[in-house]
Image: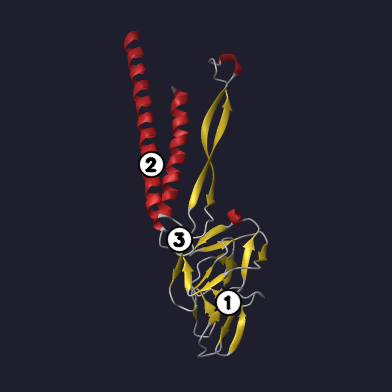
Amino acid sequence: MQNITTIALSRLAAQERVIDVAASNMANTGTPGFHAERMVFADWLLRQPVGSQPPGGQTIAYTQDRATYRDLRQGPLIHTGNPLDIAIGAPDGYFSVQTPRGVRLTRAGHFELSANGTLVDGSGNALLDTQGQPIQAPPNDSNFSITGDGTLSGASGRLGRIAVVKPADPQALRPEGNRLFATDKPTTPLARPDIVQGAIEDSNVQPITEMTRMMADLRSYQFITQLVQSEAERAQTAIDKLTQKRA
């Protein structure tokens, strides 16, 4: 009975994490550039002592929360008409922005001009060009156009080429909030970023599918909880009966 309970509890802990991840996905259905997260489970095998093995009971398999990975499929493009909203058509590309903590990566493509003419995101982080420098426009510049390779031009002429990079391991990116990611691994320039001007990439979370998955996960959580409670009640009943016999 003890084995049943501990195995169920390992699954219960993992299932709680699944629900947390699904809730985070649901909360970000409207977050530009957000990619849904998924869980990876594995069996953690515990070998029993040789002297008291039941038939066929050589190992006990516990559920292990192995990792979380991001669904890197591209989200739908939302056309805004804002000339400084830009989306990356390539699913493996990221913008580079300069933050107080260093260079960070993002797929959220809503940018605007700061008071000094620097192209920045919603948090004031400067968008970088292929030389690693902030992109700036002269005062009162207008008529911005962005080509598919990231070349930005205004009424005053060419302003620079927006850097779009590919991380060595996208799954190793560390989320830092505000749709920013940090990485310790190298990045390489993306030759064909397929930038789309006047659009942003929406979250790739599909609300109906995610809600259905979350409901199924919740039912699994409830079932496992009932199993643990049933085992606890059965163990207590056995203890009570043994106590009564001895009395």
- Looking at the picture, tell me which residue is in the foreground, 130 or 198: 198
Q: Is residue 179 visible?
A: yes
Query: Where on the picture, by quarter, is residue 96?
Result: bottom right
Pointer 2 residue: 216
> Given the image, on which type of amino acid does mark 1 rest?
Thr
Give the percent coordinates (x, y) of residue 86. Answer: 51, 72
Q: Is residue 6 left or right of residue 99?
A: left
- Looking at the picture, tell me which residue is in the foreground, 67 or 101: 67
Among the two numbered marks 1 and 3 on one chain, the one whose residue lies closer to the N terminus: 1
Task: Determine the CA span between mark 3 and mark 2.
Answer: 22 Å
Among the two numbered marks 1 and 2 on one chain, the one whose residue lies closer to the N terminus: 1
Q: Is residue 94 above or below residue 19?
A: below
Give the percent coordinates (x, y) of residue 66. Answer: 55, 42
Q: Is residue 236 left or right of residue 53?
A: left
Task: Determine the CA span between mark 1 and mark 2.
Answer: 44 Å
Residue drawn at x 43%, y 54% as measured from the top left: 25
Task: Determine the CA span between mark 1 and mark 3.
Answer: 23 Å
Give the percent coordinates (x, y) of residue 90. Answer: 58, 64
Quadrant containing the C terminus is top left
Q: Is residue 62 above or below residue 148?
A: above
Pointer 1 residue: 147
Pointers 1 and 2 in contact (CB under 8 A)? no
Q: Which mark is residue 203?
A: 3
Query: Where on the picture, by quarter, is residue 45?
Result: top right
> Given the image, on which type of amino acid does mark 2 rest?
Ala
User: Dot 2: within a 10 Å radius of its alpha carbon, few (fewer than 14), some, or many (20 or more) residues?
Assistant: few
